[in-house]
Image (tube, rainbow, N blue to C red):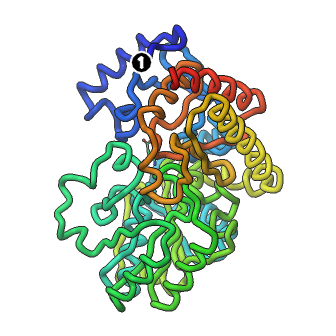
Amino acid sequence: MPSMTSRKLEQSRRLQQRAENLIPGGVNSPVRAFKSVGGDPPFIVRGKGSHVWDADENEYIDYVGSWGPLILGHAAPDVLDAIVSAACNGTSFGASTPSEADLAELVLAAYPSMQKVRFVSSGTEATMSAIRLARAYTKRKYIVKFEGCYHGHSDALLVKAGSGIATLGIPGSAGVPEEFTQFTLALPFNNTHAVEYAFQKFKHQIACVIVEPVVGNMGCVPAADDYLVALRLITEREKAVLIFDEVMTGFRVAYGGAQELYNIRPDLTTLGKIIGGGLPVGAYGGSNEIMNLVAPLGPMYQAGTLSGNPLAMAAGCAMLKRLRDHKSEIYPQIDKLSRELVEGVAAAAKDAGVPLCYNRVGSMFTWFFTAGPVIDWDSASKSNTTAFGNFFRAMLDQGIYLPPSQFEAAFLGTAHTQEDVQQTIAAARLSFAAVKA
Ligand code: HOZ
């Protein structure tokens, strides 16, 4: 499909060529390479509020938000100030700093299911450690995950995973010996019978069930009514650990995450993204009984040179304080604006005769290029990814930056405006016409 605007691309193309000679695919995380959508990835040089600018000075309304962390928009003043003032005192000590307990207090106050929390540097580390802890606690080997859910790139979790694995259409990763995934059971999402069956078949052998309570990594797919309740009841009955992977949903779908929204207490929670205020942070936490198994208190080992990094802790504290102090305005506001955006774009698709359905929970959402409904990986994978790619590029040409994959959630934050939303809907109208042409 020809370009819809005269967007300049010279600098981004030059930077991509340079990067490709130095970094695999020119990227440090695969979906950024635009392989599934085509076109040239813009090299971003700055961001402010809901907008980003590329190396050719093209401006975009950003619905990626660094893949979730930037709920307050780019370069949020509170967060920037906190980072600068922390940096002036030094960037890393490899020793305890007061800000670690500051962030821990904020997190624990928001998540009553946790009595202790351990900070790491990424969501991958958080989920990998939570799985190890669940195995240490139960002294069992098997783990249950769901098709299309993505919990980072540790070996045992790269089974029927979402995100880049789904985007690139690959079954898993080379370099993971099958023995390393022999204890991973990947079940269909939103299917309680499959979970019951697995617990019957592997009686007293399943350590944990890990789930994204609102999936973001096969696109946005919410849990069906009572599905999470069923997971809670089954895991309780079977004495297995229930892990909510709230790396995306934590502080996003509600201040207290999906567990607050749906009123369910998991045994362990993993967090990331928003809690780092845009710097690299992950976390896992749960009851004292479970968390006291973590070294140095207990025998479950996990460590990290940059864990609890003072800049990241300061950014996270600033972000969470802002969200906590204004949560009664912020969450309804981004929910309302997201609804307007998502429904407006869906109406434009309907007018254009493009088959499309959407899922949305608060400010995370996906337009799937299928009549739907999308409830699991089977239905998500029926999406017309060619049509999505055409739509994506047409939107980008009009200055709308969406996640470059049908199988990643988009995000809206407090910096987005009515004007952004109206501009996005207008761009979608033109893009759907182009998708059909
Ligand atoms: N897998 C990440 C989102 N689910 C993408 C991270 C990135 O490319 O920055």
- Residue kind at label 1, given as amino acid type: Ser
Ligand 1 located in image quadrant:
top left
Image check: 182 left or right of 118? left
Q: Is mark 1 within 8 Å of ligand 1?
A: no
Could you say which is closer to the camera, residue 223 or residue 241?
223
Residue found at x 54% / y 83%: 288
Would residue 121 be seen by someone viewing this image from the given angle? no
Image check: 407 left or right of 73? left
Residue found at x 55% / y 45%: 371
- Judging by the rendered image, the residue that carries numbered circle 1 is 12
Is residue 281 placed above or below 102 in the rendered structure? above
Could you say which is closer to the camera, residue 259 or residue 80?
259
Q: Which residue sits furthest right?
A: 329
Is residue 172 placed above or below 341 in the rendered structure? below
Q: Position of residue 126 (x, y in %)?
A: 44, 63
Q: Which residue sits furthest front?
A: 353
Residue found at x 27% / y 55%: 172
Residue 346: quadrant of the picture: top right
Image check: 104 left or right of 8? right
Q: Which residue sits furthest top?
A: 6
Image check: 23 left or right of 344? left
Secondary structure at badge 1 equals helix
Is residue 122 placed above or below 227 in the rendered structure? above
Q: Position of residue 118 (x, y in %)?
A: 49, 68
Would residue 393 be seen by someone viewing this image from the given angle? yes
Q: Position of residue 74 (x, y in %)?
A: 62, 35
Q: How many marks?
A: 1
Could you say which is closer to the camera, residue 85 or residue 317?
317
Q: Quadrant of the N terminus?
A: top left
Q: Position of residue 250 (x, y in %)?
A: 60, 59
Residue found at x 46% / y 23%: 42
